[in-house]
Each structure stands twice: as C-alpha cells, then as structure tokens.
Amino acid sequence: MTSQVDGQDHEITDEDLVPGLAVGRYRAVCGAWVSPASLTAPPGRPCVACATELAPAPTLATAEQHSRSVRRAVAVWLRTCSTTVHGPTRRGAPSWT
C-alpha cells in the first residue's frame, strides 16, 4: 500500500488491515502508519524496512551451501571446457618430448 506521507509502498498484514479500515490508517510491517494514496496513483518505491522484515537475511549455513554448490558447478564447467579444448587429462608421469 503506497503511503501519501512518504510515497513508499509499504507491506500491511491481514491482521493490521481490518482495524485500519475504520480509521483509514494502517500499521505497516515496518511500524510506520500509512495513509493510503489514491488507488489510481502508481505504486511507490518499496519500503526497505518492510522488505527486510518479510525476507530476513539468509543464515550462514544456507549461504555456505549456496556458495559450495556454485563453486562445484563452476568447477564442472571449467573441467568440461578444458577437456573440450585440451582433450582428456592423462594420468601418470608427464611427457617432456
């Protein structure tokens, strides 16, 4: 819901929507009081505080798993490219001739 006051698009929960109908002001997820803009007005820029409340930062374990899977995928891709360009890797002693 876009606020008349700050022009930002705030998130309003269902629990806060019903009580706000009586007074025309709604409590946003970030804690701001929102007086809605006209329904014909385009949505404002998203409220960063509301977005942060609704989508918290990922946990460290999730970030590590994601990082590991990305590294693994890049390693497979590089191995495939190297094999395509240089041929299969040879095991054993290097040949200097």
Image (cartoon, grey):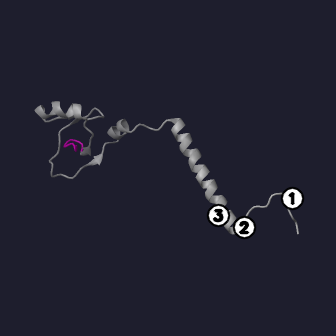
Q: Nearer the viewer, residue 90 or 65?
A: 90
- Give yes or no for residue 5 being in the magenta stretch: yes
Q: Name the amino acid, label 3.
A: Cys
The quadrant of the picture occupied by the C terminus is bottom right
> Residue 54 at what x, y percent from top left?
35, 37
> Residue 48 at what x, y percent from top left?
35, 42
Which residue lies under the disc numbered 2? 86
Question: In the rendered view, would you say 73 is above or below 23?
Answer: below
What's the CA distance linking mark 1 and mark 3? 23 Å
**Residue 8 falls in image quadrant:** top left
Q: Nearer the viewer, residue 96 or 92?
A: 92
Left/right placement of residue 86 relative to residue 41 reads right
What's the CA distance linking mark 1 and mark 2? 17 Å
What's the CA distance linking mark 2 and mark 3? 9 Å
Left/right placement of residue 6 relative to residue 79 reads left
Q: Residue at x 21, y 42 (%)?
A: 3
Left/right placement of residue 81 relative to residue 47 reads right
